[in-house]
Amino acid sequence: MSIAVDRDQELIGRVIAIADEVAAVHADEVDREARFPAETVAALREAGALSALVPETLGGVGASLRAVAAACFELGRRCSSSAMVFAMHQIQVATMVRHLDDAPWFQEYLGELCAQQRLIASVTSEIGTGGDMGRSIAPLSEAAGGRLHFTKLAPTVSYGAHADDLLTTVRRCEMAEQSDQVLVLSRREQTELEQTGTWDTIGMRGTCSPGFTVRAEIDSGQVLPAPFSDVMNQTHVPISHILWSHVWLGIATEAFERGRAFVRGQAKRAPGQPVPAAAGLSRVMNQLSMLRAEVRSALDEFERASEEPGRGRLGTMATILRFNNLKLAASEQAPLICSAVLELVGIVGFKNDSPFAVGRLLRDSLSARLMVANARIHDVDAGLLLIAKDV
Amino acid sequence: MHTTESASPVSLQSEIREVLRAHARLPVDVDTLPDDADLFRAGMSSHASVNVMLALEDAFDVEFPDEMLTRGAFESVEAIAAAIGELVESPAA
């Protein structure tokens, strides 16, 4: 076995243990109280998992995206909120690592991230952009002493109040058009967060994602050199869709396993007798296998496209459509699976305190269609389809 | 429809500018931008850029293959001229 494979296996093994021993234990309480999954995040920190994607040369684990995706899946089975926090943090890390361009401030920062296991939240959405991540209203403005500042009104910032640092999209400068964006990493001590809403939702309650007004003052080195338009197509969007869909696959897989446990229990109770729910379970397995195939093939394609010099293929419309399709398919399939399991399990699945409960899984999975609304993605795809050729 | 083989670079670029004027929905007059100006930075949205690509395919009677359909290939008058030039020179591609 190669060293890289060992590293990946070690990471996945640690995360599975955390998922089973920590995330699963607190999941119901995290959901009930809509509280941050602090125990899971502490355990992930302890395991060094927050720097999984940072190369070893900068002090990180140097794990592959595949391993991190597997970790998202495993956490997703036990606690969706923990999994989504982990996934979103990894998206921010991947963004910096893949677009580092030897920027000295960011190299140093990634070293600190590894040593201190800092948790990074994302501030990409903004009030007034209609959910279009490719546009920003808030500009980066000049402040005293050559520093820069911004004030951004964000409708949701997942785990904003629990993050050590924030990665925020802003307009390059006051003169720049809305589509001319850059990413800024601001540390907690440089950032003022004013909560502007609540987070009492039907699912993903532990991600604690209310709105915030974000104000920060930073040094010019804290602006990622690459334009966000490149970062978005080559990294941010495809990796978001890949890691989110692994979380959703984890949720759907857990729902299926609960349905399976129910059917096996029925079969054992009356050996030889027909189990009415068994045929339903077979249909759910089929839906689950389609979801799994979509999620896995997208990861394979992303890995291949990332290895090409210049990552040119990731910027093509055909590829943008491909990873949008992943998001659309996975976000629609996962709640269908959870709801099909609920139907076959029946009332014991509807009860929150039964071993076959699927309520939390179903509610959490409903967020998938909304985090970047599918209607918005369909609008984008409809435009791209007019011009893309081989889709 | 214009035949691009006979077009000089100057008229190729003015034809591109005509398409941009009609479809790019820039907040500024396209003629105030130099050939190498970044059209996205000048305010062309992704949505408008798709319409620009469609109009260019129509005006120059070409089809941009997928590998050419990137932001970079349409980011300036210069880049668009190069993309069209490539397709016109090697129609089999």
Image (tube, coloured by chain):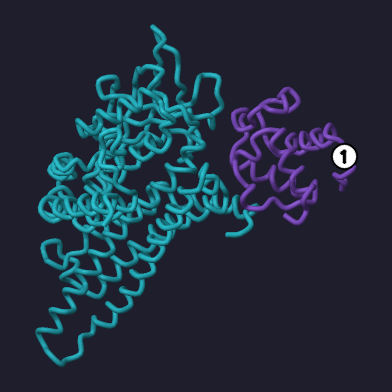
Image: A148 above or below A302? above
Image: A240 above or below A255? above
Task: Report x, y in % for residue A22.
Answer: 11, 50
The residue furthest right is B6
Left or right of A15 in this view: A148? right
Q: Nearer the viewer, residue B50 or A112?
A: A112
Residue of label 1: B7
Task: Report x, y in % for residue B25.
Answer: 67, 35
Chain shown in cyan = A
Task: Report x, y in % for residue A218.
Answer: 36, 18
For numbered disc 1, what is the local secondary structure?
Answer: loop
The residue furthest front is A2
Image: A188 above or below A238? above
Q: Is residue A203 visible?
A: no
Name the residue located 51 percent from the left edge and 19 percent from the top edge.
Answer: A174
> Label 1 is found on which chain of the structure?
B
The amino acid on which the numbered mark 1 sits, given as a three-letter code, is: Ala
Q: Nearer the viewer, residue A311 or B22?
A: A311
Task: Report x, y in % for residue A37.
Answer: 17, 44
Left or right of A272 in this view: B38? right
Left or right of A218 in this view: A23? left
Name the residue located 55 percent from the left edge and 19 percent from the top edge.
Answer: A175
Name the residue located 38 percent from the left edge and 61 percent from the top edge.
Answer: A296
Chain shown in purple = B
Q: Quadrant of the N terminus of chain A?
A: bottom left
